[in-house]
Amino acid sequence: MITDLEPHIRPLVEALNATGVVRTFSSCEGHFRPDEQTIVDRNRAEVRFVPADGFPAGAVEKLLAFVLTRFKSRHGLIPINVVGYKLYTPIDDETVDETYVLELRPFNRFDPPDRKRSDTDRAVDQVIRILALWSENR
């Protein structure tokens, strides 16, 4: 059981893992208050994952496409923009790591921190409902 997840992102991590298509390995619930800022941009929530054993990259991409298109058609881009992408990270001179990222970023970076938190939490719930719909239609 995963025990060190931040509480605001835990439900989304669990919902993604429950699809059986992906295996998550990193997440961040988003840190919006000025005292939570670091040199790295933390004004977003995200989950990083790879295909689960036995699933090709295409299955992950279909899942992401389903989530992203449903979210945009149902909820738009404001107040939270939900995006997914494949991240290529160089490991050494020969190796590039490939992972997927589902990111929930407040559209207006000037919104107050409490609004960003509540908007992000609502978007997490909305994405979880979309993942449940995907599972029902599989």
Image: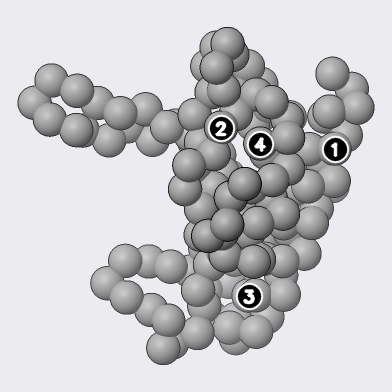
**Crowd around label 2: few <14 · some 14–19 · many ≥20 (10 Å):** some
* Distance from the alpha carbon under mark 1 to that under mark 3: 24 Å
Amino acid under disc 4: Asn
Judging by the rendered image, the residue that carries numbered circle 1 is: 132
**Crowd around label 3: few <14 · some 14–19 · many ≥20 (10 Å):** many
State the image coordinates of residue 98 (x, y, percent, origin top left): 37, 27
Q: Nearer the viewer, mark 3 or mark 2?
A: 2
Judging by the rendered image, the residue that carries numbered circle 3 is: 116
* Distance from the alpha carbon under mark 2 to that under mark 4: 6 Å
Viewer-closest of 111 and 29: 29
Q: Residue at 59%, 14% (x, y): give it.
A: 55
* Distance from the alpha carbon under mark 4 to that under mark 3: 25 Å
Residue 103 visible, this angle: no
* Image quadrant in which you'd find residue 3: bottom right
Q: Nearer the viewer, mark 1 or mark 4?
A: 4
Is tag 1's residue or tag 4's residue first in the polypeptide sequence?
4
Q: Secondary structure at mark 1?
A: helix
Judging by the rendered image, the residue that carries numbered circle 2 is: 23
Q: Secondary structure at mark 4?
A: helix
Q: Residue at 47%, 48% (x, y): give it.
A: 26
Judging by the rendered image, the residue that carries numbered circle 4 is: 17
Q: Residue at 67%, 39% (x, y): give it.
A: 16
Q: Nearer the viewer, mark 1 or mark 3?
A: 1
Q: Secondary structure at mark 2?
A: strand
Amino acid under disc 2: Arg
Amino acid under disc 3: Lys
